Image (cartoon, rainbow, N blue to C red):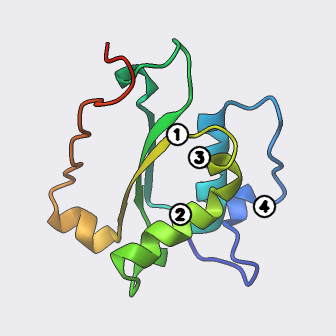
Amino acid sequence: CALPISGECPEYMGESTKNNMARQERIEQKLRKELCPALLAVINQSDMHNVPPGSETHFKVVIISEHFEGMTPLDRHRKVNDILKDELSSGIHALSIVPKTPTQWESSGHAIPPSPACMGGNKK
């Protein structure tokens, strides 16, 4: 995805975040708009934790983007956290981020590290 000067992905220009949109959809929209990912998976892992059914509190983001070229792993995480700062301040309890460049994704064999089991709350 070639980026215009504004840094927004062309197919997402002009879209607004709706208040009634599910948190997972807002996360996807914001990351697509800012990072034009070659691959994006936003996985709601709330059901693995001691939260009410239908919760949107625990997420794993797997994002493959050319924007990560030349960035350290910490800077990639900071970038994603900055894009999602509103979501992180309004109800997300946990966010796992797997940010890779397309080259790293190919050389990893498309491997996504497993998430740990829930260790908190009253344990299911």
Callout 4: few (<14), some (14-19), or many (20+) C-alpha neighbours within 10 Å? few
Q: Name the mark nearer the viewer: 2 or 1.
A: 1
Q: Identify the amino acid type marked 2.
A: Val
Q: Between marks 3 and 2, how big is the CA–CA gap?
A: 11 Å
Label pair 3/1, CB-CB below 8 angstroms: no
Q: Nearer the viewer, residue 39 or 20?
A: 20
Which residue position holds label 2? Answer: 80
Which residue position holds label 4? Answer: 13
Helix, strand or loop at mark 2: helix
Callout 1: few (<14), some (14-19), or many (20+) C-alpha neighbours within 10 Å? few
Which residue position holds label 1? Answer: 93
Q: Position of residue 36 (x, y in %)?
A: 56, 64
Which residue position holds label 3? Answer: 28
Q: Position of residue 92 (x, y in %)?
A: 57, 40
Q: Between marks 2 and 1, how big is the CA–CA gap?
A: 15 Å
Q: Between marks 3 and 1, how big is the CA–CA gap?
A: 17 Å
Q: Nearer the viewer, residue 73 or 8?
A: 73
Callout 2: few (<14), some (14-19), or many (20+) C-alpha neighbours within 10 Å? many
Between discs 3 and 1, the one toward the N terminus: 3
Between discs 4 and 1, the one toward the N terminus: 4
Helix, strand or loop at mark 4: loop
